[in-house]
Amino acid sequence: MPSADVDAITNGVSEFDVHDDEIDFTDIEQKYSVKFDEGLDDVIVVDGVPVITEARQQKLFETIQKRFKSHAGIDIELEGMHIPYGDNGDSKGYMFIEMASPEDAAQAIRLMDGYAFDKKHRFAVNRFTDIEKLANLSEEYVEPEEEEYQPKEHLRSWLADHAGRDQLVICRGDDVEIAWHNKSSDPQVAHSRQRWTETYVQWSPLGTFLITFHRQGIALWGGPSLERFMRFPHPGVRLVDFSPNEKYLVTWSHEPIQVPENAPVGPQHFGPEDEGNRIAVWEVRTGHLLRTFPVQQDEQPGQLKGFTWPYLKWSGDDKYCARLTPGQAISVYETPSMGLLDKKSIKVEGVVDFEWCPLSDKDKDAIAAYEESQAQGSSGGAAKGGAKKPKDNMLVFWQPEVQNQPARVTVMSVPTREILRSKNLFNVSDCKLHWHPQGDFLCVKVDRHTKTKKSMFCNLEIFRMREKDFPVEVIELKDPVTAFAWEPQGTHFAVISSNDPQLGAPAPGITIKTQLNFFHLHPKGDFRLLKLLDNKTCNTLFWSPRGRHIVVATMGSSQKFDLEFYDVDFSHEIRQGSVSQDPAEDVKLIGSGEHYGITDLEWDPSGRFVATSASVWRHSLENGYAIFDFKGQELQKHVQDRFKQILWRPRPRSLLSKDDQKRVRKNLREIGRTFEEEDAAEESNLALAHRELYERALDEWKAWRSRARKELAELRRELGRDEGQGEIELAKKLEEAATEEVEEWVEEVMEEREEVIGA
């Protein structure tokens, strides 16, 4: 090639004049960079490994292999472990492990990250692909934008209602309404939105938040304007459960968690270690994701799909939550770390179920006083009265009979794991654990069979949790028990039993005959039968949250929809605190009713009103809701198409001090008179409003009639007819028409006397 052509191509630059270090290849490297092999998702990097020499490599690998098997349940091959060494012959403190699958890698990250190998070494586990991404992060620090502070609304503003009214949420079709409940009139709508939720709504336990469900997750709403407080992204979420004090919530979705490649990263989002799981635990205040869990049955092929809800059960103070591995163990987790208590589960062979002991009002006051004392002490202030440390949490679990070992109920202290009480049970078919809402008693309902196993009966094993050594009282019932419920603020409990031969498998259209039993704590200290009511059809029990009153309902039947309202302390006001001479007479039926097609029943927080409903989710016959007072009088009834649900808004504990509450009870008559006057004024105003509405409608009708007459007169004049001609013709026609005369005789006997005159 001629030199002139070469110079034209190279612009006269000789190859000896160009140096590689003077050329910027950045744009070419970015354009033609090789994408990282996504096939390495099964490789993990474990940091925090002890520094060793090559001579100790085999022993370290075997130890790590055992730890992964015991702690995470993952088998790894020794050939899949690789550890790099430095020039001095020592390892670099990290290693690579090839897992059997990306799923095993995700499980290893979830369970082994943060694992304490020994006192000096704690593992940090990541995917190998994530390490490559982190290595390419920019070293230049970019300060994040500071978000402008947005003040939040008061989350308990509804408690300041001047009339002390409760709120309801009503779902009908696509509409969701939050309304104030009025005693003498229809609910007053405070908020109404269309398509606020995609499925249903739910209140948090203390009424602070309204939960709505969406395809991408759930949202919490609160404050006077019901603005959105927080979002929790969990696609396909179906169920939500809160901790008792609303600090944490648990969500479940039928869809396994999937994390896209470019998914956002942060404490509120799922990570690669969460893939495949279906249950998530969140912190309500921050929206942070604390932990995720797989559904146990999904990991065990051959078993029926499904699980019990709530998946996690919470202690009364929100410090612990626990889950059951049926037949094996109870796993207790500490909050907020969600780490396993003492790094191991409570092994209980054959365990079937467990329940936490609820906290009483006194227990909650003691916890609040202790926390306040600790806070003052840590801030340098004087501790308030040296508040005592609250007692430990307790849980109860039961194990079935296995070969020659009897069934057993055990009460355990947490976190010490000390066994406080246990009792053996024989000939057991099933057990149900029922804590008194104040934690004073524990009733274990034991379904027992005879030695021939041809018939069933029931024992109630009642543990007294406030007495030394937790003594147990046994009440034997000859018939199977279908329902049990404690009185929330008292010492009564109600039981529904049945000896109906159709009980096991009722035929369609057959209503089971039941007995209603009321028990009470006798002044001598034992529980005794208070009253037995036979030949009933009821199957559900609903105590008032304040105690004393109970609604007994027949639900799930196609023929019976009865509601019965009972007062178990009818003469309380008359006795004025004295002991009743005949306690059975205190149980009175004070009202009854019926709600056709009833599917749900719920008391309001005050214990004054009851809402019953018939949801379109169950059937399409006369859907709607009704409001009763505690005496069984129907106050309102609304039949609504596509009605779905109605829920009372819960209330937190009273904000009044103990002294204020005593003062209110002392002056209850005077305060009650004020409320009675307000109720009378409300009824008077309501009657006046109805009267005004009637008069307005009457005036409108009179005005219309006057206009119609004028228009008719003008039309007649236009047609050349006399104004009175039409009326005269109509009168003649009526006279000519055949008429029928009707006579009515009314005979009234004023007095009737019969005398017998002797002969």
Image: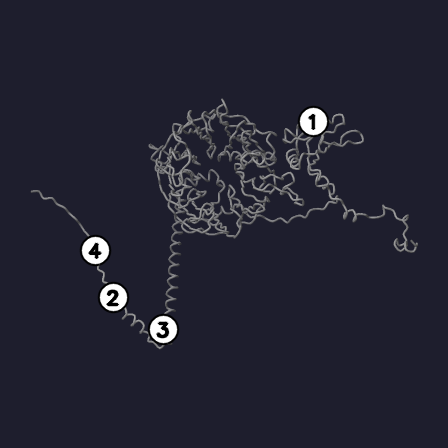
Q: How far apart are marks 1 and 3 (CA)?
A: 111 Å
**Which residue corresponds to mark 2?**
738
Q: Which mark is residue 165?
A: none
* Residue that extends furthest to the left in the rendered view of this protein: 759
The answer for how far apart the CA atoms under marks 3 and 2 are is 30 Å
| Disc sitting over residue 713 in the figure | 3
Residue 72 in the figure: left or right of residue 472: right
Question: Which amino acid does the dot numbered 2 rest on?
Answer: Ala
Say whether residue 269 is left or right of residue 510: right
Amino acid residing under circle 1: Glu
Mark 3 lies on a secondary structure that is helix
Q: Position of residue 706 (x, y in %)?
A: 37, 68
Separation (CA) of disc 3 from disc 4: 45 Å
Query: Between disc 4 and disc 2, whose residue precedes?
Result: 2
Please report whichever mark, 3 or 4, sits nearer to the chain's N-terminal start: 3
Disc 4 designates what residue? 746
Question: Quarter of the image holding residue 128?
Answer: top right
Q: Looking at this rendering, what residue extends furthest in the bottom direction? A: 720
> Residue placed at 69% from the left, 27% from the top?
62
Residue 219 locus on image (x, y percent): 56, 46
Q: Work out whether residue 167 can be spotted.
A: no
Callout 3–callout 2 Cβ contact below 8 Å:
no
Q: Position of residue 245 (x, y in %)?
A: 53, 39
Measured as percent of width and height from the top left, residue 119 is found at 68, 28
Are the residues at dot 1 and dot 4 in contact (C-beta closer than 8 Å)?
no
Amino acid on which the number 3 mark rests in the picture: Ala
Please state which of the two labelled residues, at mark 4 or mark 2, is closer to the viewer.
Answer: 2
Looking at the image, which residue sits at the far right?
3
Element type at marker 2? Answer: loop
Q: What element carries label 1?
A: helix
**Mark 1 or mark 3: whose residue is earlier in sequence:** 1
The residue identified by callout 1 is 62
